[in-house]
Image (spheres, helix red, strand yellow):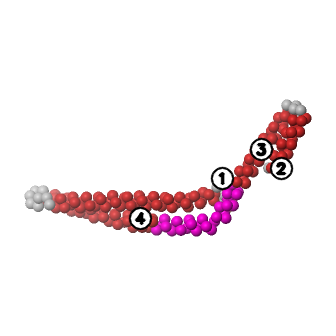
């Protein structure tokens, strides 16, 4: 059996268009949250770089002579390299923030365009949903009236009650 997108686009209860529209709308929110996360990460990396730079200076001012001189030199070099790596990470994260922000701006523009261009589709989708709900209610009422009429017939109800039930059933049938 071949599954065709057009057969399943509208989804359950004809919510397909709403799902796509909301995903697009909340994609902007998600993009902004991601950019904010990267900004926070960048500031943490920048702080780490500064702290490691201070640590490198402290290690560099240690005793240059004596048995610990090579250890101090290794600590200074390591702290400087780590500081440099954290600074590089800041730059890469900053670039990511720019890219995500650019994407969010483009998504926002696209969302506005889609909102303007597809307002007719949105109205039709809402009309389909409304009609489906109304149809289901009418069907339920019709089925219920049929059950009530059958019950009255089984219970040997009076002709007047049967006539009332039949009128209600016909009215429900017309609405359905």
Q: Is residue 1 above or below residue 152?
A: below
Q: Residue at x 86, y 39 (%)?
A: 164
- Helix, strand, or loop for circle 3? helix
Magenta range is: 102-129
Local SS, label 4: helix
State which tag comes first along the sequence, 1 or 4.
1
Instruction: State whether residue 19 is above or below residue 136.
Output: below
Could you tell which of marks 4 and 3 lies nearer the N-terminus? 4
- Give the number of the disc on residue 141: 3
Q: In front here: 171 or 67?
A: 171
Image position, residue 70 (x, y; %): 14, 60
Spot occupied by residue 56 in the image (x, y as percentages of width and height)? 21, 60
Residue carrying label 4: 97
Q: Nearer the viewer, mark 1 or mark 2?
A: 2
Locate residue 140 relative to residue 92 in the image: left or right.
right
Q: Nearer the viewer, mark 1 or mark 4?
A: 4
At x 55%, y 61%, the residue is 24
Image quadrant where residue 147 sits: top right
């Amino acid at each position: 059996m071949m599954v065709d997108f057009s057969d399943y686009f509208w989804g359950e209860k004809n919510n397909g268009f709403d799902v796509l529209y909301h995903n697009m709308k909340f994609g902007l929110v998600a993009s902004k949250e991601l950019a904010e996360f990267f900004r926070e990460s960048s500031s943490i990396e920048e702080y780490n770089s500064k702290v490691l730079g201070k640590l490198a200076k402290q290690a560099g001012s240690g005793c240059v002579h004596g048995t610990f001189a090579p250890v101090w030199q290794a600590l200074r070099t390591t702290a400087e390299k780590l500081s440099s790596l954290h600074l590089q990470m800041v730059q890469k994260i900053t670039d990511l923030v720019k890219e995500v922000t650019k994407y969010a701006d483009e998504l926002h523009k696209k969302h506005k365009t889609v909102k303007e261009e597809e307002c007719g589709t949105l109205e039709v989708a809402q009309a389909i949903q409304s009609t489906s709900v109304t149809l289901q209610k009418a069907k339920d009422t019709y089925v219920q009236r049929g059950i009530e009429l059958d019950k009255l017939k089984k219970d040997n109800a009076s002709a007047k009650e049967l006539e009332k039930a039949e009128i209600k059933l016909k009215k429900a049938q017309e609405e359905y």
